[in-house]
Image: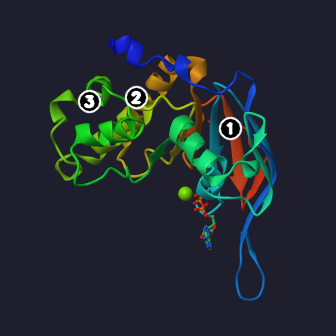
Amino acid sequence: MTPDSLTDFSKNTLTPTQTLLQAKGLGYSVSQQDQPLVILRNLDLNIQRGERVAILGPSGSGKSTLLALLAGLDTPTEGELLWDGKAFSSLGEDQRAAVRAKEVGFIFQSFQLLPELTALENVMLPLELRNETDAEQQARVWLDRVGLSQRAGHRPTQMSGGEQQRVAIARAFASRPSVLFADEPTGNLDEGNGRKVADLLFDLNEHAGQAMTLVLVTHDRQLAARCQRILQLESGQLVMPEAADE
Ligand code: ADP
Ligand code: MG
């Protein structure tokens, strides 16, 4: 495989409809002693294939909960989520796990690398779980793309936060997901490293083109403004985005 064929996203298996993710009256509550605590209420949204969408909102507004629902990691208590036109709730647990493994990539605020594995092994892991035969070669290509070929043998504790997040980005892109969910990807980094990580994320996403949809959660307006569309969440509800104030 040549490096370019490794980054070819055309192998993704979802059929090409326009709307990739659709939420209809989506809600999420948790039970408490007296009355349920409503975390998300009555959300309607559509995300198109290849779109870059930011979900902007203050801390505690429900962004991470919404991301978990959109990615099928958690189940809504109200409403419905459609993936490529299919109700996620109509899939069995095995089918959902298969969709997640094949189609979904994640980047978290806290990097979430496995501490006992090297950078290379962290990037290889999802490829090995998919039984890809050239996992190591692919992982090396991606480490090179994020500028970390020299750190292949280092463990997360031997790397800075910015470097760890670049490894996490390599790991997410290496699986060629249809949808990449990023939850506050620069939230634990200083300004300079945050900008570098954001530049890398947007560069690689642009390179993937229509084959990769990006859903980015953030409370940082400048970061959100790099997406094509901003959804604004406040107290678990979508509100009209405010006009840009700069
Ligand atoms: P954000 O990512 O925007 O900071 P979250 O989605 O993490 O917000 O959380 C939204 C609100 O829901 C917060 O007030 C949080 O404490 C609460 N919350 C989230 N999950 C649970 C849960 N399982 N049980 C109780 N409260 C929760
Ligand atoms: Mg959060």
The answer for how far apart the CA atoms under marks 1 and 3 are is 37 Å
Q: Describe residue 32's horizontal placement relative to residue 183 as left or right.
A: right
In this orientation, does residue 69 appear?
A: yes
Q: Which is nearer the eye, 7 or 222?
A: 7
In the drawing, does residue 38 fall left or right of residue 70? Answer: right
Task: Give the x, y percent position of residue 4.
Answer: 38, 12
Residue under label 3: 136
- Residue 190, compared with residue 1, is above or below; it is below
The circle drawn on residue 230 is 1
- The quadrant in which residue 162 appears is top left
Is tag 2's residue or tag 1's residue first in the polypeptide sequence?
A: 2
> Foreground: 234 or 125?
125
Question: What residue appears at the point 37 percent right and 43 percent down from the top-left corner?
Answer: 191
Q: Which quadrant contains ligand 1?
A: bottom right
Q: Is residue 115 above or below residue 131?
A: below
Q: Is residue 71 visible?
A: no
Which residue is found at the position 66% from the left and 60% from the top?
61
- The secondary element bearing badge 2 is classed as helix
Foreground: disc 1 or disc 3 = 3
Residue 66, compared with residue 170, is above or below; it is below
* Quadrant for the C terminus in the image: top right
Amino acid on which disc 3 is placed: Glu
What residue sits 60% from the left and 26% below the top? 13
* Mark 3 nearby-residue class (10 Å; few <14, some 14–19, many ≥20): some
Which secondary structure lies at badge 1? strand
Query: Mark 1 packing: few (<14 Cα in 10 Å), some, or many (20+)?
Result: many
Element assignment for label 3: helix
- Residue at mark 2: 200
Q: Position of residue 53 (x, y in %)?
A: 64, 35
